[in-house]
Structures are given as C-alpha cells and as structure tokens.
Image: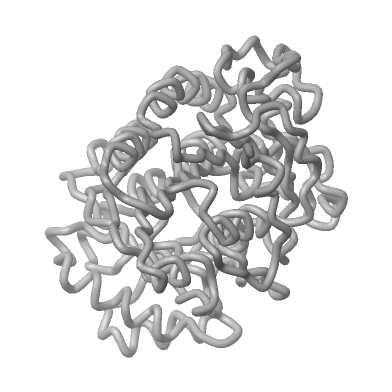
Amino acid sequence: MQEKFNRICLVVLDSAGVGEMPDAAEWGDAGSDTLGHILERRQVSLPNLRAMGLGNIRPLKGLEPVAEPIGSFGKCALRSNGKDTTTGHWEMAGIVLDKAFPTYPEGFPPDVLERFVTEGRLPGVLGNVPASGTEIIKELGEEHVRTGKPIVYTSADSVFQIAAHEEVVPIKRLYEICGLARRILDGEHKVGRVIARPFLGSNAGDFWRTENRHDYAVPPPERNLLPMLKAKGLDVVCIGKIASIYDSVGVTQDLTAKNNEQTVEQTIAALGADTRGLIFSNLVDFDMLYGHRRDPEGYAVALERFDIQLPNIFAAMGVGDLLIITADHGNDPTFPGSDHTREYVPLLVYGKAARGGVDLGTRGSLADIGQTIAENFGIKLEHGESFLAAVAAG
C-alpha cells in the first residue's frame, strides 16, 4: 500500500480528558471531566484548538463548535484495565491490557521493602507513601541527608520512586538500587515504572530535583507499533518521557524534554529534520504540575500556552505530515484526591493534505490511533480500528 503520509506526529496532552467514561464510577471517578471543568471556571482562550475541532467533540463552555474545522475530531475510550500513563500510551501502540498495573495507595508491602533494604545493603527507607515528589523531599529530605536512607514513594500511577540527594547517594549508586528495585518488583508487584528521583540543596527550603531522573520501565510486548515501524526502516523519534514509557523498545531517536516548552521546541525541531515515520511527544506538565496538584488555573494557563504554540507546529509540518493530538487518560484538577480520572480523551487530526471537518465519532480504543499509523505504513496491529481512510484526502 502506498503511504498516505510520509510522517505522523503524535502529540499527547498528558491527562487532558474530555469527560467520564461509562465505567468511571467503578474507578471512583463519576462526574470527572478534566477539560470540561477547567473551561467552566473561566474563559480559556484556545482559538487554534477550537479551529482544529476541539469544541466539535462535545459541548464545552466558552468553546463553541466551528462550522468548518481545519482538522478532524472525535474522542477515544481507554479500553484497557487501567488509567495510568503506561496503560494509555501502550494502548496507543496497540497493546490492550486486561490486567491493570498494580498501584499502592497504602504504600508498598513490608516484604517488598525488606528485600529491597537487605539486597541493596541500605540503612532502611523513608516515606513509603503516595506523595508529590517536590513535597516529600521538603518533608523528608533533611532526615534522608542525616541517615542516608533513600526516600521511597509512589503516586496514582503504578510507580516505585526513589528520591535521594546526589551528595548522599551518588547517581551511580542510585541507579544501581533502582535497577535492583526493578528486578524485585515482578509478578504481582510488577509496577509500570521504577523511577530514580535525585535532588540537591542544603535544606528543606531549597531542595530541588535535578535532571538526572531515570526511568526503569516494564518492557512492552514486542508486537507493538514502535518496534514494528523500526523493523521497516522507519524513524521512531520520541520526545520527553515517551522512550522511557516503552523502555526504549523500537525507539530510533530519544530527544530530551523536561517540560511542555521543551517538548514543543523539540517537536518543531523534529518536524524540521529529514525523517520518515513517527514523531511521538508527551506534554507532561498538564498531568505532573496541574492535574495531580489540583491546580485548574495552572492547567488553563498551560492549555492557552500550548494553543499559542500550535501555529508554530503547523508551520513546521510538511505537506506529507499528519498531526494527531490526544491524551492518555484524565486528571481532573477540580476532582477530589490527586489520582488520574477514567475519562475519554480528545482526538484531533490535522494535515495540510488531510481532510478537515470529519467527525471521527467515539472510538472504542486508543489503539485506533496506533492502527491508523500502522496502516499508513503498511503494518497491521492486533487491536484497533483505523481511521486513515476518513482523514486521507484522495
């Protein structure tokens, strides 16, 4: 099959859900609506996302539908059993999980920590609670410096995070114990990611996390979109935390980006390079800084900032490029707690040579995105229904 598009750029607005899924109550998320509730609080200026068709997906306050959107639009369900980062992203690559990755709202069990301490030759651990990474180093960082005990914590995601001061636990040693934790956390305790979270500073008032974070992910099943594209000699350019989510399986280039601004810059740079295949980006701030921390105003400002940058992404696209914007789950900043929320996610598709104004409806799975990309490059995934024919002109 002849390719309709030379490159597909997939941008994930991490956690930007568009309303509860039918099973939301089973997850404790009845009534959640990330974008809907943010837009209800004040007028949020999103003219470019509106032009793409965001307001055509469903009624959103202050974001009226447009008669002739430049993009195609719809929403995707998360078919997998879960609502975390790894689950959502894996589903985009055609992996549908029947069993959710384990989470630990009460902390990790004693036998896991005892083995970690013993085999790691550690003086013990601090924390073992769900927490914000910046807050827990303020709370326990000074005790960690005094005792040498690493700080272990988790979040709403399936993660085992280890925070340590770089002058107390050198980076090489931190990575070593994270690798140990990855080996220990198997079977029923196979979390999606173990994450090294190093920090510096002299006291609780000025501790700060460094850029030496490192993720140890569960390798995805081999038959997924990324390695299948790579096997065909195509580029798989990953930006931000994308490579770590897939344990670098199938990745041909990993571009560092620590926040939304850097992710957009790297995406534009990647569009300017001579590549053919997939560019895959994640805008982490929506989830990390504003969803989990329940900051709807910060979320709104970040959405406005991304909207301002969208024309720069459009301008960097070639005639043979297709842009797909979506999310991996919800994280309603107006909702109780700090957990992700079980929501539909937006689907916006734009290309200079693609059809606009197509209502793609409610897709049964995020895997539809992966299947669309796969079909474009002559690949077939196990899960998902392609919408390539609907958006490819001619």
Quick check: 218 left or right of 144?
right
What count of labels does the image hold?
Answer: 0
Query: Which of the two residues, 243 or 203, is positioned nearer the viewer here?
Result: 243
Above or below residue 86? Residue 65 is: above
In which quadrant will I find the C terminus? top right
- Residue 392 rendering spot, x and y as whole percentages: 62, 41
In which quadrant will I find the N terminus? bottom right
Above or below residue 206? Residue 48 is: above
Quick check: 316 left or right of 86?
left
Above or below residue 52? Residue 12 is: below
- Residue 310 rendering spot, x and y as whole percentages: 46, 24
Q: Is residue 85 visible?
A: no
Give me the residue at 32% from left, 89% from top: 119
Give me the residue at 62% from left, 54% from top: 372
Quick check: 132 left or right of 291?
left
Above or below residue 42? Residue 366 is: below
- What kind of colouring is applied to the model shown? one colour
Query: Which of the two residues, 260 or 107, is positioned nearer the viewer here?
Result: 260
Quarter where residue 103 is shown: bottom right
- Residue 20 rendering spot, x and y as whole percentages: 79, 42
Q: Is residue 167 visible?
A: yes
Give me the residue at 50% from left, 85% from top: 186
Give me the residue at 73% from left, 41% from top: 75
- Residue 37 rendering spot, x and y as whole percentages: 72, 26
